[in-house]
Image: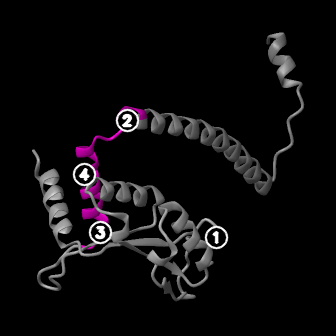
Amino acid sequence: MSSVSLWVRDLPTPPRLLPEASRQRSIEGSRRYHDQRRETRKAQRESDVSAASASIGQLSGRELLIAGAIAYWCEGEKAKPQLRTYEGVNFINSDPGLILLFLRFLDATGTSRTQLSYRVHIHETADVAAVTRYWRDLTGASQDQFIKPNIKRHSPKTVRKNTGSDYYGCLQIRVLKSAALYRQIEGWASAAMSAA
C-alpha cells in the first residue's frame, strides 16, 4: 500500500451533517451561485439592450408613423361595426415610454396638443393627486386638459402587484374630433401589417 493511501486513510472523517443543515448549506450555495449569475445576466441584458437601441438610432418621420400606427392598433380603441360605429382616437397605456412615443406620433401627424384630453385610470389605494402630477409632468399637458380620473375600486380577493410609489396606473389620451385621423391610422397600420 502506498504512503499516500495510508495518509488518506488516517484522515479523520468529517462529521455528517444533519438533513436540515445539509439542506440549508445547499440553499446557501444555490443562492450564492444565482446571485453571481444574476449580476452577469444583468450586465449582459444591459449590453444587449444598449446595442439594439443604438442600431435603431433616430426614427425618420415615416418610421414614426409606422411605429405609432402599430402601437395604436395594439393599444388603442378600435371601431367595431357590430358594436359601435364611433371612429375616434383613444389610446390608453401604463408605459411612460409608449405614452411619449404616441405623443411624438401625434405631433408627426400634425395633431395639435390642444386637441388632446387626458384621463388617469388608477386604483383607489393610490395617491391620485401625485399620479396625476406625474402624468401631467411627463406629457407637458395643462391641468385643464385632465378630466376626472377613473378610480377603480379595490377587490380584497385580488392579489395586486401593481402597488407602491412607482405605480402610476394608466393614462388615456383622447384626440378630439379625430375621425379622419382614426381612418388614417387604420390605413397606416393596415399597410404595415400587410406588407410582404
Q: How much space separates mark 3 and mark 1, taking CA atoms? A: 26 Å
> Can you identify the residue that label 4 sits on?
65
Amino acid type at mark 2: Gly
What amino acid does circle 1 point to?
Gly
Q: Vertically, is 70 above or below 58?
A: below
Position of 103 with respect to 126 (left or right) is left
Q: Position of residue 34 (x, y in %)?
A: 63, 44
- The residue to which callout 1 is attached is 164
Figure check: 111 above or below 152? above
Q: In which quarter of the image is residue 32?
A: top right
Q: In which quarter of the image is the N terminus?
A: top right
Q: Name the residue under label 2.
A: 57
Q: Considering only order in the chain, which callout, 4 or 2, is on the residue closer to the N terminus?
A: 2
Distance, label 2 to label 1, CA atoms, is: 34 Å
Q: Name the residue under label 3.
A: 76
Q: Return the disc, 4 or 3, that comes first in the chain's sequence.
A: 4
Q: Nearer the viewer, mark 3 or mark 1?
A: 3
Measure the C-alpha gap from mark 2 to mark 4. 16 Å
**Residues marked 2 and 1 touching at CB (< 8 Å):** no
Residue 73 magenta-drawn?
Answer: yes
